[in-house]
Image (spheres, helix red, strand yellow):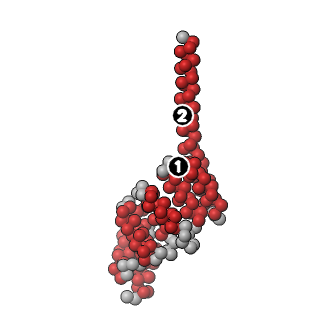
Amino acid sequence: MDTNLLNNYVLKAIDAYPYAIEETVENLNYALSYESNNAYALYLMGRLQAEQLGDYEKAKYYFAEALASKLDFIKVYPRYILVLLWNRDYDEAQKLIDFAKTAKGVGKGELLVLQAQLFECQELYKKAIKAFKKAKLFIYNNSYNSFVNSEIKRVENKLKPKKKKASKKKTSKKAKSKKKKNN
């Protein structure tokens, strides 16, 4: 197959996504019919399945195929991990995060943010905050740093209500026991 034609279809699909879904799908199908293991076409098909169609199982399939085709295709890792989180496949997500840490070129800060999000999904809020704070050490972008700061505050707020509820219960029990003693 002519590589230029394949690249042409992949580039057209990249250009069309996410604004012209029909054109994206058409070009991806052409690209995958020419080369069924084209990593970029598989990656984009995985994104389409997850982000536009909400079919996480198909997205997982396409992302896994993209990595099988090209293990050093670092764009796949963060999106694949997100899909695993959305699909509540937490053990699989942790394994992929651990593996992605060994791949050259994958952003350590981004992986730590995903690790924090995994901890949050598992309701391990203190670990999530710690991972977010560690991620800040590897972030070189002010807007992404602001995002991480807002995530830290959001997760910290999840911890605060639990403490307030516990203290209200204790004070209400104390108040009840004082009322009983006074009566």
Query: Image point 57% across, 12% down: which residue?
Result: 182
* First reached walking from the N terminus: tag 1 or tag 2: 1
Q: 167 and 39: which one is in front?
A: 167
Estimate how packed mark 1 is, as few (under 14), some (14 to 19) or many (20 or more) residues with alpha carbons within 10 Å.
Answer: some
- Residue indicated by mark 1: 124
Whole-angstrom CA distance, mark 1 to mark 2, is 18 Å
- Residue indicated by mark 2: 165
Residue 13 visible to an observer of this rendering: no
Estimate how packed mark 2 is, as few (under 14), some (14 to 19) or many (20 or more) residues with alpha carbons within 10 Å.
Answer: few
- Mark 1 vs mark 2: give the one in front: 1
Is 130 rendered above or below residue 18? above
Amino acid type of the residue tagged 2 in the rendering: Lys
Query: Image point 56% across, 63% down: which residue?
Result: 110
Query: Image point 56% across, 73% down: which residue?
Result: 104
Residue 34 visible to an observer of this rendering: yes
> Quick one: quadrant of the C terminus?
top right
> Quick one: quadrant of the N terminus?
bottom left
Q: Check disc 2 and report its element: helix, strand or loop.
A: helix
Point out residue 176 in the picture as x, y percentages from the top left corner. Answer: 53, 20
Point out residue 164 in the picture as x, y percentages from the top left corner. Answer: 57, 35
Amino acid type of the residue tagged 1 in the rendering: Leu
Q: Check disc 1 and report its element: helix, strand or loop.
A: loop
Query: Image point 45% across, 56% down: which residue?
Result: 90
- Farthest bottom residue? 2
Point out residue 133 in the picture as x, y percentages from the top left corner. Answer: 63, 55
Point out residue 120 in the picture as x, y percentages from the top left corner. Answer: 51, 51
- Farthest top residue? 183
Q: How many marks?
A: 2
Q: Which mark is residue 167?
A: none
**Marks 1 & 2, CB-CB < 8 Å contact:** no
Is 124 rendered above or below residue 144? above
